[in-house]
Amino acid sequence: MARRRFFVDSIRNGAAELRGDEARHLTRVLRVEAGQRFEISDNQHAYLAEIEEARGERVTFRVVEPIAAVPMPVRITLCAAIVKFDRFEWMIEKATELGVDSILPVEATRTEKGLFDASRKRSERWARIARESSQQSRRVQVPEILPAVRFERCLEQTADHRFFFDEAGAPPLLREIPAERSDSAALLIGPEGGWTDDERRLALASGWTPVSLGPLVLRAETAASAALAVVLNAWLE
């Protein structure tokens, strides 16, 4: 059974500590004791670590040895139109499990009114979801949740490969992934109701490649997960 992984703020002189809810979970739920081993990450590298002390809201670790990390084949920014928050949070969780590097929430023309402004109050919650999902999937780094932007600003996102997902007659994603692949990609996923003609025109004019995930209309969170899985597997070939 794989050891559980926790993120710590820093590791200094081979020592680290965990505080707050995660420390309470270890001490009160798991009832850990000195000498037990877990994995920890400082968001840069992962280590096998041994608990030195566990009391209340504070757990201290001693690093035992580094853990080799499996590098991701491509750095992906998921540019996702904001949908209802329960579904958007599900998207964050699954995108994190699939190895996304960063997530950029986007206000599209058909984004439900009020979600863009309300998203500013969700940043801490979304970051916590990404952190918890990173621990569950044993990532070394937590993906960055970027501040939400409007559609036109999103089109300025830089990447070696930029894919604009559109169900309106776009060619299949796999057909548009080039044989020569660089190490960064951006995926732009639309809102409920899809893109407007103006948004399609602007994306094309900004150099994004229109692609689809097949003939069926997918929910935004489903499309995001499917797109990430296809791109990651294409880069792993």
Image (cartoon, rainbow, N blue to C red):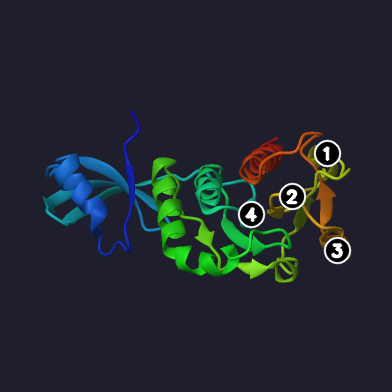
Does 143 sit left or right of 1 as displayed?
right
Give the numbered dot on residue 198. 3
Q: Residue at x 37, y 58 (%)?
A: 42
* CA gap, disc 1 and disc 3: 22 Å
Amino acid type, label 4:
Leu
Which residue is disc 1 drawn over?
A: 172
Mark 1 or mark 4: which comes first in sequence? 4
Tell me the number on the disc at residue 193: 2
Secondary structure at badge 2 equals loop
C-alpha distance separating marks 2 and 1: 20 Å
Q: Which residue is mark 4?
A: 78
* Amino acid of disc 1: Pro
Question: What amino acid is labelled 3 in the image?
Answer: Asp
Q: Residue at x 32, y 63 (%)?
A: 10
Mark positioned earlier in the residue sequence (2 or 1)? 1
Q: Earlier in the sequence, mark 3 or mark 2?
A: 2
Circle 1/circle 3 CB separation < 8 Å: no
